[in-house]
Structure formats: C-alpha cells, structure tokens
Image: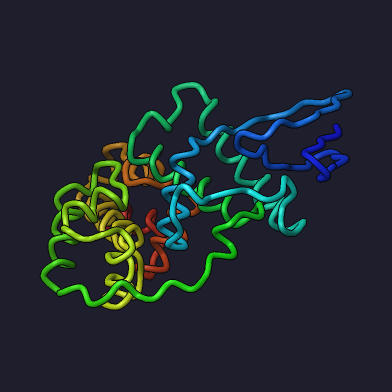
Amino acid sequence: MTVKSGRDELRLPSRSVFFYPLNVPLEVGVFDVIARTLRLPAARLAAVAEEMAGIDPAGLRFESISPVTPAMGQHWFALMDLASNALLANDSVMTHPVLAEELTRTVAVTALHTFPNTAMTAPYQPNPGWVPPATVRRATDFMQARAELPLTLDQVAEASGVSGRALQYAFRRYYGTTPIGYLRRIRLERADAELRAADPDSGVQVGAVARKWGWASPSQFSLAYQERFGVRPSHTLKSH
C-alpha cells in the first residue's frame, strides 16, 4: 500500500499504521491488502488536545501521516487490535457507555502521542491561577455521585464552575493526578467494593466488574487493582 499526502509519501509494509489527516485529500495505491480503519470524531480529538496541552481546539492540526517513532506505531497497532476486537465481538461490551467513553479517550490520547500534531509543540501556557479547595470538592463530589456515568472533563469542569484547564491544574496540585485520573480512582474503589460484597459462589466474574467500571481489558484492570490494593482482584473475590 502506498499513501501520499502532499510531499509526505509512505510505502507501507505489513502491520503498518498511518494517520488519515483531517480535511486533507490522500492518494492511495492498494494491492493485496487487508486494512482496518478506526474513525474518531474530530471534536473529541480536539477536546482531548485542549485537556492535555491547553491549546485552542480549533488550532489542532496533524502535521504528518507517519507515527513519530516505529515503537509508537506498534503501540498504536496494538491499540487498534484491542479496540477492533472489543467493538466487533458478538454482544460487544462496548455498548456500556462508561467503557465506550474510556476507550474513546484512550484512543484520542494515543493518537495525539503517536502522530505529529500541534498539541506536541504547544507553547508554554502559564498556570490559570489559584483554584479554591471548595471548587475542587465540588468536582470530587460531582464525580463521586456520577461515577457510573460516562463523564468528560468538560462536564466536571462545568459542574465545578471553572475551566477544564484550571481544574486540571488544581487536581495536579491537590491530588497529584488529573480529574479523569481521580475519577478512575473512584471507579477502582467502587469495583473493589463490588468484589468484596459479591458471593464467590454467585458466578460474579472479575472481567464483568472490570467492564462495568471502565476497563476493556481484564489484565489492565488486574494490574491497576493490584497496584492500588496490593492483591489481585480474583484473590479479593475468593478470600472474603
């Protein structure tokens, strides 16, 4: 497969990846090929770029169709495998809105780290100023009350009465993580509570609990759980 975008031309061997730029025509030559395409809304990419780098969403541009490094290209390929297997499976678990939101955000973040774009070279942005603890508490209370819903940074920031960038800065200051990272902590604690309350003989599965609280991969959930609680989730389910 050959792909040409302006002066940027790729000859793609097996297991290659490239980014289809927004609103830019491509010339594609195809021979003996099987391809998978993952489409992500441009507005979702722009919102995540604003969250990560503080850039104006309208200013997001992808500057090359090639991954920044071969290693990041392979990382993207692995994510495509995960996403396509989850989305195309019979009775796909991706119908769960929390899981769909988590996968969408993961794909957006990975795309912004894999393919050259203006978020990578955004100029330094001064911090947005002091955010009072009461505002941060409003944000945490909002997430605690709605952890089972597919929340976005914009929704949490609106409920808190500040911008998304200001809330990001405040959470890093007070909690050492982002608002979405804090939300994942809440969901991990809810998953732990559910596993501890479950009857081991009732047929409850760790994978089902993981999916309910936003993890498409049971192995990734197990790693996060063990890092947080010191034991594997299967041990918690059996031991009580």
Q: Image check: 16 left or right of 178?
A: right
Give the colour scheme shown: rainbow
Taking depth in this image into account, of 230 and 19 the one nearest to the observer is: 19
Residue at the image point whose x is 71% and y is 58% from the top:
68
Taking depth in this image into account, of 97 and 63 the one nearest to the observer is: 63
Q: Residue 65: give x, y in percent of width and height.
A: 72, 45
Residue at the image point whose x is 33% and y is 44% from the top:
209
Q: Which quarter of the figure has residue 132?
A: bottom left
Taking depth in this image into account, of 234 and 120 the one nearest to the observer is: 120
Q: Image check: 175 left or right of 43?
A: left
The correct choice, above or below, for 101 with respect to 194 in the image is above
The correct choice, above or below, for 71 with respect to 176 in the image is above
Q: Residue 145: give x, y in percent of width and height.
A: 14, 50
Q: Image check: 175 left or right of 231?
A: left
Q: How many marks?
A: 0
Q: Residue 143: give x, y in percent of width and height.
A: 20, 54
Which quarter shows the N terminus?
top right
Taking depth in this image into account, of 118 and 156 the one nearest to the observer is: 118
Q: Which quarter of the figure has residue 236?
A: bottom left
Which quarter shows the C terminus?
bottom left
Residue at the image point whose x is 44% and y is 42% from the top:
44
